[in-house]
Image (cartoon, helix red, strand yellow):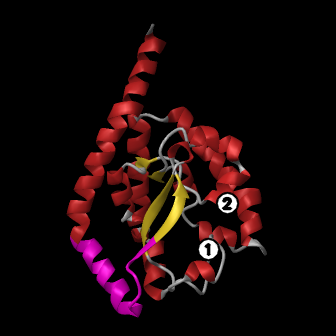
Amino acid sequence: MVCVKISLIMKMYQDIGKKVIDFFIAAVGLLILSPLLFIIGLFIKVSDGGPIFFFQQRIGKNFKKFRLIKFRTMVVNAEKLGPAITRGEDPRITKIGRVLRYYKLDELPQLINVLKGDMSIVGPRPEVEKYVNHFRDKYKRILSIKPGITDYAALEYRNEEDILKKYGDANDGYIRDVLPNKIALYEKYLEEMSLLTDMKIICKTLWRIIA
């Protein structure tokens, strides 16, 4: 009986509670951070005159495609000059982009994705289609929930670009080693998903940013 009640509580959180918390955090976050977002956007625009935001198609819940929003941290048309993933010292990254990436400030516009219902605050990081297709069977379960801004994998691979530097072929290293490890962490989150787990991940993420 106790197990049934816990299961029902978990389902209510996943179906209702998580949506309410996502909307509240995203709305309040955008309101509070609006001056910072404006300043960052101004710096990006002044630096080279290019677009402030970077949009990229990612795969969301139930394999539905959506446009991920980030502050632009690379040169204009960077996607035509190199691979979808980046590693440390990538020449396509701008000076201000390096600062934004280091402090994860480039991710802040994804709060808009959360408000739109494409993403959650906590959940498996959304991937581009080519990488999802490599592990499609695994992603059938992973994408039963919305992707998120942060999770266990985001914390573990905070310095992913530096990790990829050790591979001669970053794309091969990502598919062979990094992404399988991320998938294991995504599956761990699915097993442990709860309000307490989400709050712990959010707190750890904020601590990593300011520490």
CA separation in Å, label 2 and label 1: 15 Å
- 84 magenta-colored: no
In the picture, residue 96 is in which quadrant? Answer: bottom left
Q: Which residue is mark 1?
A: 86
Query: What numbered label is drawn on residue 130?
Result: 2
Residue 203 visible in rendering: yes
Direction from residue 137 to residue 40 in the image, left or right: left
Magenta span: predominant SS is helix
- 47 magenta-colored: yes
What segment carries the magenta color?
Answer: 35-54
* Vertical arrangement, residue 33 with respect to residue 125, above or below: below
Residue at the spot 60% in from the left edge and 87% down from the top edge: 91
Pick the front one: 99 or 24: 24
Tag 1: amino acid: Thr
Direction from residue 87 to residue 196 in the image, left or right: left
Q: Secondary structure at mark 1?
A: loop
